[in-house]
Image: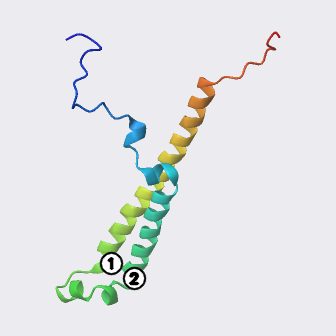
Amino acid sequence: MIRGHDDLPGLKQPVTKREQASFLRLKYPVLIPLLLLGCALITGRAAFSGEDLFPGLTLIGVSTIPLCSSIALVAGISGILTSIVGIIEYIDRQSIRAAMFPESKEQKPC
């Protein structure tokens, strides 16, 4: 196959990573970690009053404390890791911009 001539009509071009990212994640990068940490706090609180919140589970003999605690633990760890990854991506984007547009310290001749 000849390079440059493999563009067939009807086939989509490959999607870049930037286009695959969610619109909300790009516009509000703090939203997902806060949502996960909020869910962790809510389910952690529900672990202590789970018998009142989930009477169906109490009727069949399932304790709600381990269930809610494990969901809170997973959501909390996910929120922390997501925020760490967001910070690393922010730092990486700043270093790419600095590498692409270096500022010259010497004077340009007029």
Q: Quadrant of the C terminus?
A: top right
Q: Mark on residue 14?
A: none
Q: Quadrant of the N terminus?
A: top left
Left of 107 or right of it: where is 14?
left
At 27% from the left and 12% from the top, the residue drawn is 3
At 42% from the left and 58% from the top, the residue drawn is 77
Vertical side of 99 occupied by 4: above or below: above
Q: Camera-side residue: 14 or 72?
A: 14
Vertical side of 15 occupied by 44: above or below: below
Q: Mark 1 is on which residue type?
A: Ile
Residue picked out by circle 1: 65
| Local crowd size for mark 1, using a 10 Å CA cut-off: few (<14), some (14–19), many (≥20) | some
User: What SS does tag 1 mark?
Assistant: helix
User: How was the colour assigned to the protein in this rendering?
Assistant: rainbow
State the image coordinates of residue 84 (x, y, percent, origin top left): 50, 48
Quadrant in the picture for residue 75? bottom left
Residue 81 visible in the displayed image: no
Q: Camera-side residue: 28 or 87?
A: 28
Q: Mark on residue 48?
A: 2
Q: Mark 2 is on which residue type?
A: Phe
Vertical side of 67 occupied by 37: above or below: above
User: What is the number of callouts on the image?
Assistant: 2
Left of 93 or right of it: where is 36?
left
**Residue found at the very far front of the displayed protein:** 9
Spatial CA span between label 2 and label 1: 7 Å
Vertical side of 18 occupied by 72: above or below: below
At 42% from the left and 69% from the top, the residue drawn is 39
At 71% from the left and 23% from the top, the residue drawn is 103
CB atoms at circles 2 and 1 under 8 Å apart?
Answer: yes
**Residue found at the very far left of the displayed protein:** 60
